[in-house]
Amino acid sequence: MAQLTTAPDASTPDSSEPGRPPVVLTIAGSEATGGAGAQTDLKTFQQSRVFGIAALTCIVSFDPKDNWNHRFVPVDPQVIADQLEAIAAAYTIDTVKIGMLGTPATIEVVAGWLADRKPRTVVLDPVLICKGQEPGAALDTDQALRRQILPHATFVTPNHFESEQLSGVDDIGSVEDLTEAARRIHEASGAVVLAKGGVRLAGSQAQDVFYDGSRVDVLTAPKIGEVAVSGAGCTLAAAVAAELAKGADPLTAARSAKSLVTASIQGRITSNAPFDAVWQGAAG
Ligand code: PXL
C-alpha cells in the first residue's frame, strides 16, 4: 500500500509575480516515441505558455517486433506517491490534467492525492483502453476510474468510445447522440464535458460537443483525413488545462484547445512507426 505523505504546504510563491506562468501538472503515462502521453502534454504546455510538470504513472513502449502493440509497465504506486509528494511540496497546484492511469492501484494513489490536495481544476482525459492491457484488468481499471477519479474531474474530454462507455449511450452516430452522452456524463460527474466526435462521426467536419450543464455548443473544424491521430486527445485535454490555468472560461478554453489540436494534426510528424505524431509547435 503506497504511503501518501501530506507534505507541509509549500510557502506559496507569489503566483501573481509579473511574467510568472501558471504551473500545470500532468499525471500521465510515458509513451516512448513521444506521440502521446506525458511527453505530448509537456509539449502542449510549453506551446501554451504554461510551466509544465509531470508525475509518471506508467511506461508504454510500443513493440515494433509485434505490430507496434503496446507494452505497458505501471510505475510502482509508492513511486507515484513520491512524485506527487515532491510536486506538492514545491508548488501549489491549482490545475491538473489526468491522462493514462492504467491500474486500480495507481488510481487509488491519484484519487487519494486529489482528495487531499483538492486542486481547483482537474481536466480528465478518461483514457479507458490501452491495447497492451489484459482485458480483465482493463475492466477493473475502467470501473475504478469512473468511481474514484471522475468525481474529482471539473472538465472531462471523452472520445467517441469513452463517451459511449461513460454515458451508456450505445452506437453514438450523430451530434444529437453525442450531446445526449455529454449530458449524461455531466449529470454523473458535475464536470464540464467536451465529448469528441473526431473522425468517428460521418461528414466533412470533426465535431465535438461542449456541455457545461446549461449550454450546448458544437465545435467544428474540417476533418484532416479519416484516421484518428494518436496524441490528439492528450493535446486537447492538456491545452484545455493550460487555457483554464491562464484564466480562460471553459468554452473559450475548449475552442482554443481545438484550434491547437487542429494545427498540431495539420503539422504532424511522420516516422518509421505506422502512425504519425501530433506536433504542437506547428501552431506557431
Ligand atoms: O492517446 C492515449 C494514450 C495516453 N497515454 C499514453 C499512451 C496513449 C496511447 O498510446 O501510450 C501513455
Image (cartoon, rainbow, N blue to C red):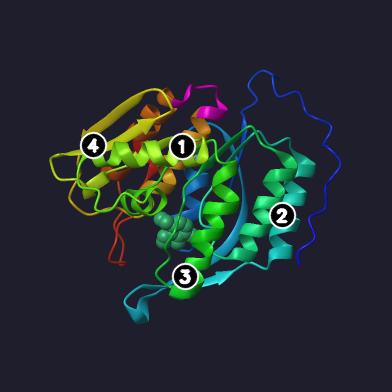
Which image quarter holds the N terminus? bottom right
Residue that numbered label 2 is attached to: 83
Q: Are marks 1 and 2 in contact (CB under 8 Å)?
A: no
The three-letter code of the residue at mark 4 reads Glu
Query: Residue placed at 55% from the left, 22% from the top?
Result: 247
Which numbered disc, 3 or 1, marks the residue that appears first in the sequence? 3
Residue nearer the viewer, 10 or 111: 111
Residue that numbered label 1 is attached to: 187
Please indicate, yes or no, whether residue 34 appears anywhere in the rendered image. Answer: no
Q: Residues within 10 Å of mark 2 (few under 14, many from 20)?
A: some
On screen, residue 94 versus residue 271, left or right, reads right
Secondary structure under the numbered disc 1 in the rendered image:
helix
Query: Residue placed at 69% from the left, 64% from the top?
Result: 77
Which numbered disc, 3 or 2, marks the residue that appears first in the sequence? 3
Residue that numbered label 3 is attached to: 61
Between the C-alphas of marks 3 and 2, the distance is 21 Å
Q: Which residues are magenta?
A: 244-250
Which numbered disc, 3 or 4, marks the residue that appears first in the sequence? 3
Q: Residues within 10 Å of mark 3 (few under 14, many from 20)?
A: some
Q: Nearer the viewer, mark 2 or mark 4?
A: 4
Q: Nearer the viewer, mark 1 or mark 2?
A: 1
Residue that numbered label 4 is attached to: 176
Secondary structure under the numbered disc 2 in the rendered image:
helix
Query: Residue placed at 54% from the left, 35% from the top?
Result: 154
The three-letter code of the residue at mark 3 reads Ser
Q: What label does residue 234 carry, if any?
A: none
Query: Residue placed at 31% from the left, 77% from the top?
Result: 67
Secondary structure under the numbered disc 3 in the rendered image:
strand
